[in-house]
Amino acid sequence: MVLLLVQNISVSYIMDVKTPFLEPNYKVTRAREIMRVTGARVLPVINNKYERRLLGIVTRLEILSVTSTKSELKVKDIMTQPPLIFDENLDVVLATKQMLSKDEWYVPVVKGEEYQGMLGLENIIMWLLYHRSTSDKNTVKVEEVMSRDVVFVKQDDLLTKVWYLMLKHRYGGLPVVNEKNKVVGIITQYDILSKGKARIRLESESEPLRIPVKEVMNRPVITVLPKDPIELAGEIMVRRNIGRLVVTDEAKSLIGIIDRADVLRGLLGW
């Protein structure tokens, strides 16, 4: 049974110990560059590299919400308190339940107050996928766990609309469709963060914000089919560091979307 693969295993055993960290007096511009280069979605903030006392976290949303006119801000000015913090000895099953119930994809792990690493949903998915036996494979299909009520944007929609939807729904990415509901791209927080021109124009307080989605979106889009096994979706997410996959039919019409939380629930039968 797949659930047995994570029973009696502590979070310290599968957490990511290589996640970059921030210190409170780092400039936000430095934090932005670290996220852009590493692709990290959440960064822990520690007091210093010697004591490593956890002070808070910074997410992509906080970084992207800082305008260029406030570039002198420091990490301590925008960091937030993590909704969850795990002790290194916490059982992975309990940790997973808490993460899914709170819809948190990343949780810092501590020993006392000392930061140890970051537990992400992908760490749990990876463990389940790479340690399962042939008999562990289930028959859950993408269509059984995907979301069908998909928020999407069009190619000519403005970046400001995308940004509003990301803030409103806490979405990390949105599929892009044409007038025939065919998926033609995807736009993510990372796209905005990494493409400097788009970010600068989004932040501008004087220039008209007229940049269309098609100038920033990624294409071609990695998609899955409704009948694909969720193991395939999980493997793609882990291998390519993708948070969500667009679900289409054979003609590339939009059907749904599946994210890491959906995959994990499907793998565990929750």
Image: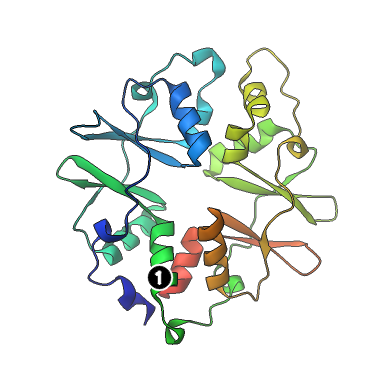
Residue at the image position 73 percent from the left and 18 percent from the top: 208
Q: How is the image coloured?
A: rainbow
Give how far across and how far down residue 73 sits, in percent.
42, 17
* Side of 264 relative to 157 (left or right): left
As drawn, 157 above or below 225 = above
Residue at the image position 71 percent from the left and 42 percent from the top: 217
Q: Nearer the viewer, residue 116 or 180?
A: 116
Query: How packed is label 1: few (under 14 Cα within 10 Å), some, or many (20 or more)?
Result: many
Residue at the image position 23 percent from the left and 62 percent from the top: 10
Q: Give the position of the N terminus as an image quadrant.
A: bottom left
Regarding mark 1 in the picture, which secondary structure is present there?
helix
As drawn, 44 above or below 73 = below
* Residue behind mark 1: 128
Q: Give the position of the C terminus as an image quadrant.
A: bottom left
Give how far across and how far down residue 6 sits, in percent.
31, 70
Extreme residue toward the right, this view: 180
Give how far across and how far down residue 132 sits, in percent.
41, 77
Q: Nearer the viewer, residue 259 or 36?
A: 36
As drawn, 267 above or below 113 = below
* Side of 155 relative to 145 (left or right): right
Extreme residue toward the bottom, this view: 135
Q: Nearer the viewer, residue 241 or 204?
A: 241
* Side of 81 relative to 211 (left or right): left
Q: Does any portion of residue 251 appear in the rendered image?
A: yes
Count all numbered tags in the image, as a single digit: 1
Q: Does any portion of residue 104 appear in the rendered image?
A: no
Snapshot quadrant of residue 157: top right
Give how far across and how far down residue 229 sits, in percent.
58, 75
Residue at the image position 67 percent from the left and 22 percent from the top: 201
Which amino acid lies under the numbered mark 1 shown in the image of this protein?
A: Leu
